[in-house]
Amino acid sequence: METIMLLNNTLEYIERNLHTAINIDDISKVACSSRYHFQRVFHSLTGFTVTQYIKNRRLTLAAEELASTDRRIIDIALKYGYESPEAFTKAFKRLHGISPSALKKLNGKIKAFPKISFQISIKGECEIIYRIVEKEAFKVFGTGFETTRINDAAYKEIPEFINKIFKDGTHDRINEALGNSKGSLLDGFHYDFKENGTRKYMMGYEIPRTEISDEFTILQVPKLTWAVFEGYGAMPDNLIIQDIWRRIYSEWFPSSGFEQVEGPCIEKNFWNNKKHDKYKCEVWIPVKTKSINW
């Protein structure tokens, strides 16, 4: 309950400071959280980066002022942090689909982006199965691409990418380098998280002692403590692993004594029977004990 209260306090802080410069470090302090963990939780719960949310709230209030007052566009642009009318117009049109001047002249329609609030929803779902693992530094190799959580694009792009590397033979070549059979399941690595919501995703595996072809990407993973979550389902079923991700951020982190730290997040898949139609999946998230309670 305290976690939700602190998250809502951050939203109130943002609302009070929409007319001034807002620093994510300051927002994180209101949440009693590290900058890194706060941004991961906020993005996972809302679907928006912190920067996106602030920008959309400012543009909503700016549109309301344009529609209801006779203030000049330049004055409103400066009030909400834009250094020029051109930058303001570009951002305004991207959200509302109409320019500020057209809104004033035509009294057009605008999109309202309301203030968010966080609430706890107790649904009586099954328990979350997890363990804490200490793992030494290791290297992985594989192939990947850059994606984003914005508009849930990653949920569409990652399955498409996996299908692609199965079809073009890359998945088999990684297994060959490992000495595995072609049908063996590889791990998925989410890493290089950016504040704008982008990240890199790679399908691969820990590097064996053999030489690795230059065609593959190498990722170095430091020594970390991991929270490892389990799920079981039929193949193919991306909803199982998506549900694990959802529950980690909406249920486990708010009630646990841990917070996320910088490092890759890993998805591991294992065949759960000889028919290869059921599987076990794991989500590995790097964590540390919270320095203070939320």
Image: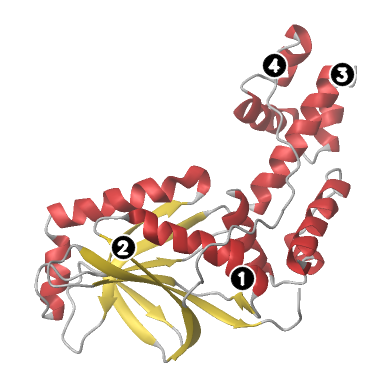
Asked if residue 142 lies left or right of residue 134, the reply is left
Tag nearer the camera, 2 or 1: 2
Give residue 124's mark: none
Identify the residue under disc 4. Answer: 109
The colour scheme used here is secondary structure
> Which amino acid type is marked by label 3?
Ser
Which of the two labelled residues, at mark 4 and mark 2, occupies the earlier sequence position?
4
Q: Residue at x 60, y 29 (%)?
A: 94
Determine contact: label 2, label 3, CB under 8 Å. no
> Which amino acid type is marked by label 1?
Phe
> Which amino acid type is marked by label 2?
Gly
Cα separation between marks 1 and 4: 39 Å
10 Å crowding of disc 2: few (<14), some (14-19), many (20+): some
Is disc 2 placed on a helix, strand or loop? strand
Locate the C terminus and report the quarter of the image it occupies. bottom right
Asked if residue 205 lies left or right of residue 227, the reply is left
Determine contact: label 2, label 1, CB under 8 Å. no
